[in-house]
Amino acid sequence: MPDTQDCQSKGPAVDVEFFFDPVCTWSWVASRWLVEVAPLRGLRVRWRSFSKLIGMGTEGLRDSDVTSRTASHRALRVIEAVRVDHPEAVCRLYEAMTAAAMEEHAQLRPLFSHLPATLEAAGLDCRYAEAAYDERWDDVIRESMADVHAVVGEGACTPVTVLWLDRPVGFQGPLVSPAPTGGEALELWDSFLRLASVPGVFEISRPCPPRRQMAPAWSELCATATRRSCFDGR
């Protein structure tokens, strides 16, 4: 797994693949948990693409959601183009995209609509934005999705976390909001790892409280924007 975010290891390193779509707010919150835990539990995180546009389509969505899902798919094309030359930059580009989307949402502008500026904010060449309309990157995205489907099945959706133990073990989720920090974040990871270590465990779920029947709103994500970041160099 060459394209990883290295971190300060305490104990045996664990390779983790995190599959996300930039438009999925559940993915963003779960990613903040992983970034929090990574340097404390020796995680090497690889950030992988999963397109909700490809995997779920647009049937039944409002026009605004179709627009956002389509724009997010274009953002994934840009991520894959960047990955070829700068695999270490994928996480910080994801962060820059989310920060821009928060601002765009607050200003009632379309999400992921200023990719050149977002690339520059992540310290990358704005010309990578040309990949947004290059359908050739869709094959790369589909390959990434095929990898996660091979582990967790065809019905998976974002986020998906895959742990590489003696075999790859994946779970959809975690769906958590707000993202735990400190000791709670570590406890969640340790429990996640224990579950993954038991071959017979396939799924655990519980009902969402009424306020969590929908994904976290973009306006709710601002509290996570100043938390530990991939820009820390880990």
Image (cartoon, rainbow, N blue to C red):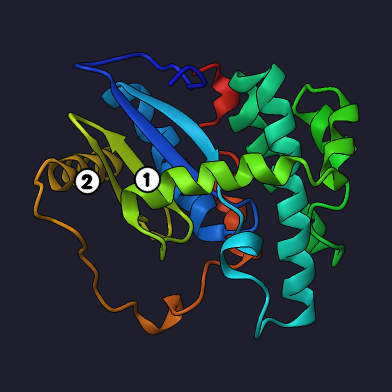
Q: Where is mark 1, residue-wise?
A: 161
Identity of the residue drawn at 85% across and 23% down: 125
Measure the C-alpha gap from mark 2 to mark 1. 10 Å
- Where residue 71 appears, x then y in whole percent? 78, 57
Q: Residues within 10 Å of mark 2 (few under 14, many from 20)?
A: some
- Where residue 48 appears, x then y in whole percent? 53, 39
In the rendering, which numbered label is found on residue 109? none
Question: Taking the image as drawn, is residue 175 in sight?
Answer: yes
Counting residues from the start of the chain, the first of labels 2 and 1 encountered is 1
Horizontal side of 231 relative to 194 (left or right) equals: right
Horizontal side of 209 relative to 6 (left or right) equals: left
Q: Vertical placement of 164 versus 13: above or below? A: below
| Cβ atoms at labels 2 and 1 below 8 Å apart | yes
SS class of the residue under badge 2?
A: helix
Asked where in the image residue 152 lies, by quadrant, the reply is: bottom left
Q: Vertical placement of 10 versus 149: above or below? A: above
Q: Residues within 10 Å of mark 1 (few under 14, many from 20)?
A: many
Asked where in the image residue 105 lies, by quadrant, the reply is: bottom right
Horizontal side of 142 relative to 45 (left or right) equals: right
Identity of the residue drawn at 49% across and 18% down: 234
Identity of the residue drawn at 84% across and 28% down: 120
In the rendering, which numbered label is found on residue 192? 2
Q: Quadrant of the N terminus?
A: top left
Is 71 in front, or is 53? 53
Residue type beneath disc 2: Phe
